[in-house]
Amino acid sequence: MSRVLVIGCGGVANVAIRKCCALSEVFTELMIASRTKEKCDVLAEELRKTSKTKIETAKVDADSKDELVKLINSYKPDLVMNIALPYQDLTIMDACLECHVNYMDTANYEPEDTDDPEWRKIYEKRCKEEGFSAYFDYSWQWAYKKRFEDAGLIALLGSGFDPGVTQAYVAYAKKHEFDTIDTIDILDCNGGDHGYKFATNFNPEVNLREVSAPGSYWEDGHWIEIPAMSIKREYDFDQVGMKDMYLLHHEEIESIAKNLPEVKRIRFFMTFGQSYLDHMRCLEDVGMLSTTPIMFEGKEIVPIKFLKALLPDPASLGPRTHGKTNIGCIFTGKKDGKDKTYYIYNVCDHQECYKEVKSQAISYTTGVPAMCGALMLLTGKWNAPGVHTIEELDPDPFIEALDKYGLPKSESYDPVLVK
């Protein structure tokens, strides 16, 4: 028996909660908590008709440690699944430590206010020392390592697809396919079409900030940073076809480089259509991607938050999105003294996801690994105290769970390499 508190009720949380409730022999009791309790109530009412999981709901402001502590102490969960915004990671981690409960999330910490002087000072120091300028990095959460170790608790970071499954693929390749890995290319392809001229497949604030930032990759022990979208490649993705993809900075590169120091180069590519890029560049040029508040008609607004209100809700894209995603990792390295290449990936169909959990594949490919990560913690398959990213843990039971619960792996031993 287990008791789980899920914080968040957006598109990804919707998938994770549905998958948890389909496995009621493990997730016997579950509370959905969000700032908007009404959304939690609607989902809970639907799931109570088909699931044996005992479901409760609550209202909570995940920016408030006091509210979180009160809720956690009242519900007494075995695990807190943070599927809210990455801005709230540290607050929820603090609350979990105070209440002595295990923690997990799907994306690493980044600040909501990038103009905050205290944060800015630390950020600028990190930029000089590390060599990349993305607003998100693991240092803030890695700083909690000893506190979680001393408490005998685990904090699982980034149990989504990328980050998350891609890191499990790295650990799996290291364990089963290679003696040494030389290069890793992480490829994220969304071949779906939702019919809108411009929309984001997950939270617009996070998505647009990530895509418009300078790209960077790891090579020969250091970061190389490039202008946003300045490295483009074409790739023929299985079941999707030929797509343009662009090199981005992505958080799992940082942790993989730390935990597999022998890897000479690690890159991350994501596909984008020309219409998306044209709209994004125009919005950036006119200041709509800014997080700095401005005065408008006597009220203070944040441009990117205003833009978020104008764009389609990512959770609404499910019924109108057709096509498939293809996300995975291509490796080069050596096995038994011989050169080797290997590609491990997953293909996911948007419409099939919607039929199962009323969501498009972007939320599905994050929500399913969130449930599988929780499953690893609750069943004791992963139980090392401290703060961990997924490549540090045994990949086999996690990948077996992914295979079983909706994200089966595909493999190629002669993939086309990315030049």
Image: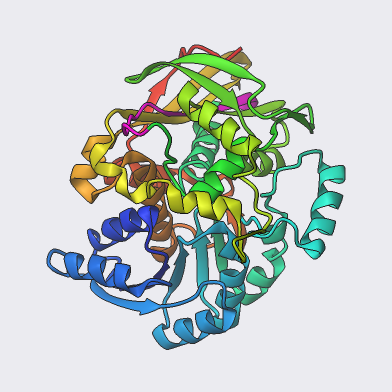
Q: Image quarter for residue 196? A: top left
Q: Nearer the viewer, residue 62 or 172?
A: 62
Residue 24 at x, y = what percent? 23, 65
Q: Image quarter for residue 223? A: top right
Q: Nearer the viewer, residue 413 or 16?
A: 16
Specify start and end residues of the magenta stretch as a single range. Answer: 179-196
Residue at image position (31%, 48%) is 316
Magenta segment's dominant SS is strand
Q: Is residue 201 depicted above or below 217 in this figure?
A: below
Q: Is residue 359 depicted above or below 84 in this figure?
A: above
> Count of labels shown?
0
Q: Is 180 left or right of 350, judged from the image as shown?
A: right
Magenta region includes residue 226: no
Is residue 80 in sight in this rendering? Answer: yes
Q: Nearer the viewer, residue 8 or 72?
A: 8
Q: Nearer the viewer, residue 312 or 211?
A: 312
Residue 338 at x, y = what percent? 60, 13
Q: Is 159 left or right of 257, judged from the image as shown?
A: left
Magenta region includes residue 192: yes
Q: How is the image coloured?
A: rainbow
Q: Image quarter for residue 155? A: bottom right
Residue 133 at x, y = what percent? 75, 42
Residue at image position (43%, 74%) is 78
Residue at image position (31%, 31%) is 195
Is residue 107 in sight in this rendering? Answer: no
Quadrant into which the C terminus falls:
top right
Q: Is residue 198 depicted above or below 98 in this figure?
A: above
Quadrant into which the N terminus falls:
bottom left
